[in-house]
Image: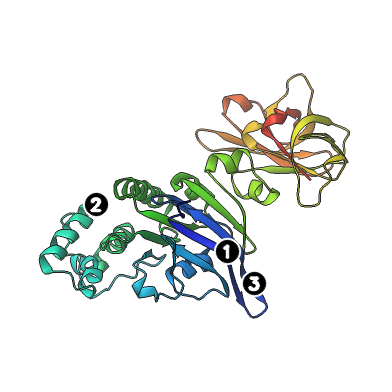
């Protein structure tokens, strides 16, 4: 059996009594764009720094092309790194910044000049070589940092929240550039972010971190439509969670009764560890905002309108159930014409588009 290009095996990182990374394992094929997604303190950056060699894990192993790299110093791992801060040398111009990792590796001058030209063309900064970092925008500085990290053709590129300092419009522009550069170079990228939209936009696969562990790994589509846990469901995409008064499960489908007596059946079931495979159980129903529909026939879940927000190409409506929980829907302005605060409606949704978590 051919070993994976990059393997993280049972990685654990502790700091005294604090467990930062808890038994993380991943198999990463060559050329993949894999994103570590999770809230602050979930272990994603600590895992990335172990790959870079910036911290030594308490236990576990990391293999590149079948060989462990844990005993290899960080500067000899030949792994590229792009940080949240641009970390450019302020006294060197753009060309000299990009050339720096090639110079320390003793590459010939002609090879350095040609490679710097290629890298600046790759990040679309031709003609910027003589500029100083202080004369560049934040997005341009991050492109220089990316060119420098790729200049020596590393097999793996690590990126730790590289766009979090940029405004939304510029961040989206650079995201498009990163995807293009990934396609053109084929480099294996491990990317850390807490922004789920960024993860969905960039990644081939996403590893969702929570409390030092990976809760689920998959494509953005898989995580969105088939979340394995309540945490993944809440972190990937927008959602509302509704408590149930009664839940009955038969196989992979469930029937719930909400506190106001409303019944919804044929819900896909997701069980936590230890949950019963059948019979009554406590649970929560997750509904995506775009799945909700106003029911003109007066059937479905009774709700009261709390607020309506116009967002240009769509609008959102915030509702409250009879037992005090809130949920919201997203729809076109035309679909919710006439909806105003304090009005009462019924909302409905396709059970197959929601999830019952036990």
Q: Is residue 165 visible?
A: no
Q: What's the colour scheme? A: rainbow
Q: CA distance from mark 1 to mark 2?
A: 32 Å
Residue drawn at (50%, 33%) of the image: 313
**Circle 1 is placed at which residue position?**
40
Dot 1 lies on which element? loop
Q: Nearer the viewer, mark 1 or mark 3?
A: 3
* Earlier sequence position, callout 1 versus callout 3: 3
Q: CA distance from mark 1 to mark 3?
A: 14 Å
Dot 3 lies on which element? strand
Residue 274 rendering spot, x and y as whole percentages: 81, 52
187 displayed left or right of 270: left
Q: Nearer the viewer, residue 28 or 340?
A: 28
Neighbor class of circle 2 (other Cα within 10 Å; few <14, some 14-19, many 20+) is some
**Circle 3 is placed at which residue position?**
19
**Circle 2 is placed at which residue position?**
122
* Earlier sequence position, callout 2 versus callout 3: 3
Q: Is residue 31 visible?
A: yes
């Amino acid at each position: 059996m051919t070993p994976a290009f990059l393997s993280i095996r049972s990685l654990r990182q502790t700091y005294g009594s604090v467990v930062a990374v808890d038994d993380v394992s991943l198999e990463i094929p060559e050329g993949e764009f894999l994103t570590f997604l999770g809230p602050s303190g979930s272990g994603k950056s600590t895992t990335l720094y172990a790959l870079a060699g910036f911290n030594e894990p308490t236990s576990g192993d990391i293999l590149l092309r079948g060989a462990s790299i844990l005993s290899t110093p960080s500067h000899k791992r030949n792994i590229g790194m792009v940080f949240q801060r641009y970390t450019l040398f302020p006294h060197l111009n753009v060309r000299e910044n990009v050339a720096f990792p090639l110079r320390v590796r003793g590459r010939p001058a002609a090879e350095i000049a040609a490679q710097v030209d290629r890298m600046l063309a790759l990040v679309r900064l031709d003609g910027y070589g003589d500029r100083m970092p202080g004369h560049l925008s934040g997005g341009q500085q991050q492109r220089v940092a990316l060119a420098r990290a790729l200049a020596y053709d590393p097999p793996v590129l690590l990126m730790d929240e590289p766009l979090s300092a940029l405004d939304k419009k510029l961040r989206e522009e650079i995201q498009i550039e990163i995807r293009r550069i990934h396609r053109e170079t084929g480099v294996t990228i491990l990317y850390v972010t807490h922004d789920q939209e960024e993860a969905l936009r960039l990644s081939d696969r996403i590893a969702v971190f929570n409390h030092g562990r990976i809760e689920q790994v998959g494509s953005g589509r898989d995580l969105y439509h088939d979340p394995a846990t309540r945490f993944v469901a809440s972190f990937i995409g927008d959602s509302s969670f509704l408590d149930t008064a009664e839940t009955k499960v038969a196989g992979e489908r469930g029937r719930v009764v909400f506190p106001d007596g409303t019944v919804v059946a044929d819900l896909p079931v997701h069980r936590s560890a230890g949950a019963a495979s059948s019979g009554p159980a406590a649970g929560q129903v997750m509904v995506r905002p775009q799945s909700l529909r106003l029911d003109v026939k007066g059937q479905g879940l009774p709700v009261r309108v709390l607020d309506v927000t116009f967002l240009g190409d769509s609008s959102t409506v915030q509702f409250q159930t009879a037992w005090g929980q809130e949920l919201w829907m997203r729809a076109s302005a035309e679909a919710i014409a006439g909806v105003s605060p304090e009005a009462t409606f019924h909302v409905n949704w396709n059970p197959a588009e929601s999830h019952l978590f036990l």
